[in-house]
Image (cartoon, rainbow, N blue to C red):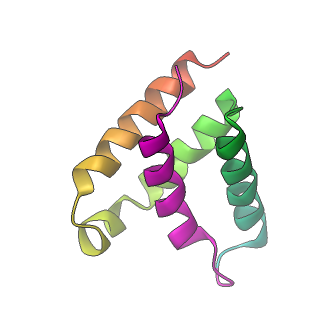
Amino acid sequence: MFYTTEEAAIVCGFLDLYLNRDSVDRAVREQNRKFQRSAARGDLRREDYRWAEKALDFLQPCWWQSHEDHRALQNALLKTHLLAERAL
């Protein structure tokens, strides 16, 4: 099981919006770039899903202020958690 194209766009777009900034730690920005590349290639691994799950959870307070459809992000977080549990 993997992200659909729409789910990948939601997750990647949201993470990129907040994590692709000079004020974000360099290691976090690099991990975000790695996640973005892996998502585009469709070869995300368990540790990628775990990282995305933690990042989405950490950024959850931003969902309500910046995005009208926070349900899509909540669904993406739930699926990310599921994928992290099931990924090989």
Q: Quadrant of residue 63?
A: bottom left
Q: Position of residue 82 (x, y in %)?
A: 45, 24
| Position of residue 44 in the picture relative to residue 67 (left or right) | right
Residue located 25% across and 56% down the image: 70
Q: Nearer the viewer, residue 26 or 10?
A: 10
Q: Position of residue 26 (x, y in %)?
A: 77, 71
Q: Give the vertical position of 41 relative to 87 (above or below).
A: below
Residue located 67% across and 45% down the image: 40
| Position of residue 85 in the picture relative to residue 72 (left or right) | right
- Magenta residues (range): 1-23
Q: Is residue 45 magenta?
A: no
Q: Outermost residue toward the front?
A: 5
Residue located 67% across and 53% down the image: 36
Q: Position of residue 25 (x, y in %)?
A: 71, 73
Main secondary structure along the magenta-highlighted residues: helix
Q: Nearer the viewer, residue 2 or 60?
A: 2
Q: Quadrant of residue 88?
A: top right
Residue located 69% across and 84% down the image: 22
| Position of residue 18 in the picture relative to residue 62 (left or right) | right
Report the number of numbered marks: 0
